Image (spheres, rainbow, N blue to C red):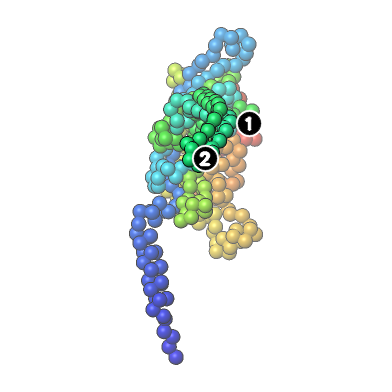
Amino acid sequence: MSTRIPSNHFNRLSVVVLGCVLFCSSPASTALAGLPRIRFDAAPLVGCRDVTTDEFRAMHPDERLMEAKFTVSSLIVHGDEDDLVQYFYRFDSPLRTVQVIDQLPNTTVASPIAGNVGVEKKGERTKSLGVVASGSFEHLLNVTGNGGLGTKDTSSVRYELLPPQELVASSGTLNRGATAFFKLKPTQQSSLEGAREFVLIFRVPAEWRADVMLARCSATGVDRNVIRQLDENGVSGSDRFVVALYLDGDKEAKQRAAAVAESERKLQSAAANHLAAIQKRAYPTVAHRLGVMLSLTEAKIPADWLHKVVEHPEEVQPHNLLRLPDPVRRAASEYVEASRQLHQWSGSSWSAAAKVVFPK
């Protein structure tokens, strides 16, 4: 027994299918391609300028003020800038060896309206009194009377208001000054894409010559839907960078800072080149992989081992990295040693238990 589809139902189905085809091929569908994708980059070396004032030196003879300028670039590799919500930048002193006391750009607001906003209010009040009399006499002239009395008051007030302001940049500190953050939002007059400079003024010990800071960058975008009310915000991109600091004009300190930057580059390269071998050693058997998925056991090599080594080398323990391939382990050893030597010039030193020498 066959079922015949009524012609009116077939026509409706055709319209729906045709609409879907037209929507998928229209420019509007390309706007629903997902979150925009952002890539960041930062300079690995930053020279710091001594900006200690006489007043500060007199009050704090054991400290100095340093100025560091960080240049961070961003690129929109996919999507539209109109779908970006904000950028977030964070600069951390891992061992809290610096204390940020000022930063640029500071918190700022802006308005899309040029000049003040004019406001005018008008009021009108009217009073009236009227008497109308009319009469008609046959064979005589018509007599009509009308009398009235009225007053009208009109008032007008004009004044100006400041235009509505929107927060376009905010900044501040966290962790008692060991962290500085910047939050930027796009405006009609400025773009988030491109290179941007961030300036930090921080306090350090008087013997300070070099140090390390971590730069974390992230972008938030809008994931568009057919129905605007269903739009959702998500992470459009994030990156982390190790930035080696040195006292401007100190050649030896600059060499040590450059050694940290170079050893970190080699470690990242070695980890990428031996990624397959690392994953195989982290999950040596299928049963072990299944156990990790079921939270019954842990990977032989922690998934975040690279972040721990790069961002907190003073906390790395050798037994966590013994299963790494030899080239990766040697690169990690070189990076940890370069970081240890550089940190000796920050005014503080790692504890004896934290000094890690990886097997060669």
Q: Looking at this view, is 334 or 232 the one in front?
A: 232
Spatial CA distance of label 2 from label 1 is 102 Å
Q: Nearer the viewer, residue 273 or 329?
A: 273
Q: Residue 98's mark?
A: none
**Which residue corresponds to the image point at 54% horizontal and 30% vertical from the top-left?**
147
Q: Mark 2 is on which residue type?
A: Phe
Q: Which residue is mark 1?
A: 175
Find residue 116 and report its horizontal and vertical position in percent: 47, 25
Indicate the secondary structure of the residue bearing disc 1: helix
Q: Is 209 displayed left or right of 60 in the figure?
A: left
Q: Position of residue 359 (x, y in %)?
A: 54, 42
Task: Specify the farthest residue to the bottom.
Answer: 1
Q: Dot 2: few (<14), some (14–19), or many (≥20) neighbours within 10 Å? A: few
**Residue 121 visible at all:** no
Of the numbered discs in the image, which one, if any, rests on residue 137?
A: 2
**Along the line of sight, the residue nearer the viewer: 191 or 304:** 191
Give the x, y percent position of residue 88: 51, 37
In what element is the residue under mark 2? loop
Is mark 2 in CB contact (under 8 Å) with mark 1?
no
Compare marks 2 and 1 and give the one earlier in the sequence. 2
The image quadrant where one finds the N terminus is bottom left
